[in-house]
Amino acid sequence: MSKQDIHSYLAEFDDIPGTRVYTAKRARKGYQLNQFAMSLMKEENRKRFKENEEAYLDEWDITPEQRKALLARDYNTLLDLGGNIYFLAKVFSTDGLSFVQAVSTMTGMSVEEYQAMMNAGGRSPVGLRSIKEKN
Amino acid sequence: MARIQAGIGCSHIPVLGFAHDTDKEQTDYFKPAFDGFNWTRKWMKEEAKPDVIVLVYNDHASAFDMSIIPTFAIGTAEKFNPADEGFGPRPVPVVEGHPDLAWHIAQSLILDEFDMTMIGEMDVDHGLTVPLTMMYGDVEKWPVKVIPLAVNVVTYPPPSGNRCWALGEAIARAVESFPEDLNVQVWGTGGLSHQLQGPRAGLINKEWDNAFLDKLIGDTQELRKVPHIEYLRETGSEGIEMVMWLIMRGALGKSTKALHRHYHVPVSNTALGHIVLEPVDNSVPPSPTLEGNNDAAQAMID
């Protein structure tokens, strides 16, 4: 086995199709975004956020890109900008969406199509293991 | 003397907790998932009757936010309340801890060079309460004490499979040196294949999952060598939770036999896996550390 350092360990994560691994780099980038999402665990905060999303977001030190993606509920972009799915779940739970409903929005499929795929046994890993190897 | 009687592996899919709490266990969608636990519920109640469970799970942005990321944390409290995950806490009993055994394990692990974080106050989310529901069903009070052992599998890097296995072995040494006569189980939870994010979401890999279950049985240690990247590629980004099952497997010692096994797809986004294992040869290697072999240091453990 060849010796692996932290750089090659991390580099492999970029070779997985359609996947953003929550690395330390992403965690640093998304720190305030995820802490904002965490604040929605409290009922009073959910209420304030729902009443006026823009005003609530003003209280958080997030980037304009993160703000735009949040308002659009663009979850793939939020992942790119350092969001973590378990934290972002607080946002879609506030919207009243289940994991299946929210997750399907990241796949380019409708909720019904996504649900049908899951009921048929889920997405096969074939062809989706590695970008380089195309396997 | 306390002893490890069995190990249980179980997914901790949140919707199964919801199905139980809203009386939907027998609906067409959920019945096949729950039916695989009938054997275990009966066995737990009539035969196994453990006193304490060391319950390995991960927190899903409930007790821990991004301000603190413990790799291995052990709950030492008298009790743990079910967490409010955004829609009120699950209507299940409060989880009773076992502070004496938890502190004993924590001290023993640190002398074994596993530098644990001790948590004196913590709410526990579906990662911990769903497996309890799957194994005990509807109860007024959990008939067991629980030591939560939270593992970081969210922010990379999580601990390696090999490290998890070795932690299990250290837990076995710790339990064995606890003087009280206790029947202990170790549970590994989470998985199996699932991906909750990105365009590849919905990934399920039945072949890999079942090969993983196969390798928990017997004396093979092959799973220690599975790298993170293999879990990611083969089982989806959240499939990495399976490293927590290796803590359970490591704690059972050299060789195991399966008493019961269940696999079902789909449960929302996730492949449901469940296994009940018994040690055949429960021997684990001796502590490799200076303090682990120092009688005076060991005598200091409460």
Image (cartoon, rainbow, N blue to C red):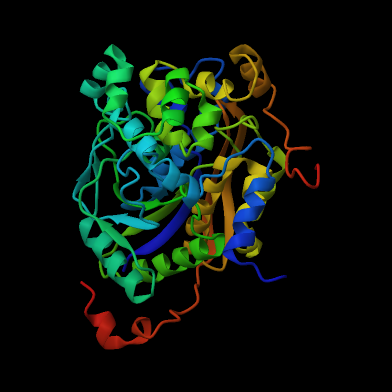
Q: Position of residue B16 (x, y in %)?
A: 46, 27
Instruction: Please name the residue shown 44% across and 37% down the image.
Output: B42
Instruction: Please name the residue shown 28% across and 70% down the image.
Output: B107
User: Would you identify the image quadrant in which residue B288 lies?
Assistant: bottom left
The quarter in which the N terminus of chain B is drawn is bottom left
User: Would you identify the image quadrant in which residue A70 lies?
Assistant: top left
Residue with the most extreme right position: A134
Front one among B93 and B77: B77
Determine whether, in the image, residue B147 is placed left or right of residue B14.
Answer: left
Q: Position of residue A78 (x, y in %)?
A: 49, 31
Q: Position of residue B204 (x, y in %)?
A: 66, 35
Q: Is residue A9 above or below residue A129?
A: below
* Number of marks in picture: 0
Front one among B281 and B46: B281
Determine whether, in the image, residue B184 is placed left or right of residue A68.
Answer: left
Determine whether, in the image, residue B172 is placed left or right of residue A55.
Answer: right
User: From where the camera sits, is residue B210 visible?
Assistant: no
Q: Is residue B92 above or below residue B297?
A: above
User: Would you identify the image quadrant in which residue A64 lies?
Assistant: top left
Q: Position of residue B178 (x, y in %)?
A: 29, 69
The quarter in which the C terminus of chain B is drawn is bottom left
User: From where the camera sits, is residue A124 visible?
Assistant: yes
Front one among B84 and A120: B84
Q: Is residue B213 above or below residue B127?
A: below
Instruction: Please name the residue shown 43% across and 21% down the image.
Output: B19
Instruction: Please name the residue shown 47% across and 18% down the image.
Output: A72
Q: Is residue A53 above or below residue B35?
A: above
